[in-house]
């Protein structure tokens, strides 16, 4: 089991007495009796629980909530240095330190949202009848003592803006908390897969069998060749062409032509479908 503690010094220790929730979860629910919501860093809700995995995410949270007066509990990894918590200028009493923030957050999220319905999708574009829109994605966590993986209940939605088009057998997953977004004029090719929380920019084209990992972000006026794979959490800037069969495993910050595994920059792109 994992140990947890609030920064005010209250603690819970490991135990072999496993009930429906582990002792850490029982303690966490007792301490958060007035926080019966979960929210993301980008869209913090008052009286909710959020989590961060690293300093970058913590500082992002601080920049978005500083001075807002919102009452939240922040799950942070025990390995995070105390100096990072201090640098955030957030109230230290808000921090709850655990070994595995994903595990605690997902279990708590599933519990508080057990009887709640996900947000309704917002679809203005054209969607082929065989396409799948709004299903849960594969966000799983493992808890010691439980042989089965636990799937996170997805409470967000899919947004498909005007003039966007989703072709046959494409699969677009709803967001975990906020929105999976396909912007104005984007084209999602047949058999493509878009993970939870992903973003596809204006007029971008995904040709058949492209696969975007969760929380990936594709800019405007991009072109992804057949079977392009984009790793979860990776961003691609505007005006990028990725050659077919490429694997994008790190952020692309400069417009141009990329291909390979991993994808690397090969030159400029003139913005046309076929490179001359």
Image: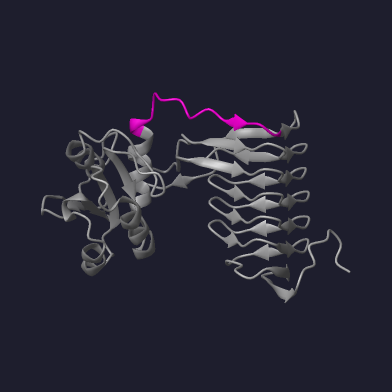
Task: Name the residue located 34 percent from the left edge and 45 percent from the top edge.
Answer: 105
**Relative horizontal placement of residue 150, taking residue 44 as reference (left or right):** right
Residue 117 colored magenta? Answer: yes
Task: Name the residue located 10 percent from the left edge and 54 percent from the top edge.
Answer: 9
The vertical placement of 28 against 274, above or below, is above
| Tally of numbered tags | 0
Q: Position of residue 43 (x, y in %)?
A: 40, 44
**Relative horizontal placement of residue 144, taking residue 89 as reference (left or right):** right
Residue 232 or residue 127, whichever sits in front: 127
Q: Is residue 145 visible?
A: no
Q: Main secondary structure of the magenta part?
A: loop
The vertical placement of 217 against 156, above or below, is below
Q: Quadrant of residue 31?
A: top left
**Outermost residue to the right:** 276
**Relative horizontal placement of residue 263, taking residue 214 as reference (left or right):** right
Residue 216 colored magenta? Answer: no
Q: Quadrant of residue 220?
A: bottom right
Residue 27 or residue 241, whichever sits in front: 241
Q: Position of residue 29 (x, y in %)?
A: 23, 37
Q: Quadrant of residue 72?
A: top left
Task: Name the residue located 20 percent from the left edge and 47 percent from the top edge.
Answer: 15
Q: Position of residue 258 (x, y in %)?
A: 72, 69
Residue 149 or residue 64, whichever sits in front: 64
**Outermost residue to the left:** 9
Q: Is residue 79 visible?
A: yes
Task: Name the residue located 64 percent from the left edge and 51 percent from the top edge.
Answer: 201
The image quadrant where one finds the C terminus is: bottom right
Q: Position of residue 190 (x, y in %)?
A: 77, 42
> What residue span does the magenta drawing correspond to?
111-125
Q: How is the image coloured?
A: one colour
């Amino acid at each position: 089991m994992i140990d947890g503690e609030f920064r005010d010094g209250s603690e819970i220790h490991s135990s072999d007495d496993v009930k429906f929730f582990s002792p850490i979860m029982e303690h966490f629910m007792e301490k958060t009796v007035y926080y019966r919501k979960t929210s993301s860093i980008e869209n913090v809700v008052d009286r909710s629980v959020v989590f961060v995995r690293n300093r970058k995410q913590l500082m992002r949270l601080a920049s978005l909530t500083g001075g807002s007066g919102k009452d939240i509990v922040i799950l942070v990894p025990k390995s995070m240095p105390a100096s990072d918590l201090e640098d955030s200028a957030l109230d230290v009493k808000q921090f709850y330190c655990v070994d595995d923030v994903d595990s605690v957050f997902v279990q708590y999220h599933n519990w508080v949202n057990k009887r709640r319905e996900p947000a309704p999708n917002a679809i203005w574009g054209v969607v082929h009848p065989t396409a799948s829109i709004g299903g849960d994605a594969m966000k799983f966590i493992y808890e010691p003592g439980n042989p089965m993986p636990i799937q996170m209940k997805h409470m967000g939605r899919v947004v498909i803006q005007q003039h966007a088009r989703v072709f046959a057998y494409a699969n677009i997953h709803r967001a975990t908390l906020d929105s999976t977004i396909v912007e104005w004029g984007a084209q999602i090719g047949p058999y493509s897969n878009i993970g939870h929380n992903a973003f596809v920019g204006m007029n971008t084209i995904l040709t058949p069998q492209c696969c975007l990992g969760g929380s990936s972000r594709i800019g405007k006026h991009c072109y992804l060749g057949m079977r392009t794979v984009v790793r979860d959490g990776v961003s691609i800037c505007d005006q990028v062409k990725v050659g077919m069969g490429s694997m994008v495993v790190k952020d692309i910050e400069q417009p141009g032509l990329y291909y390979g595994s991993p994808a690397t920059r090969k030159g400029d792109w003139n913005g046309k479908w076929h490179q001359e």
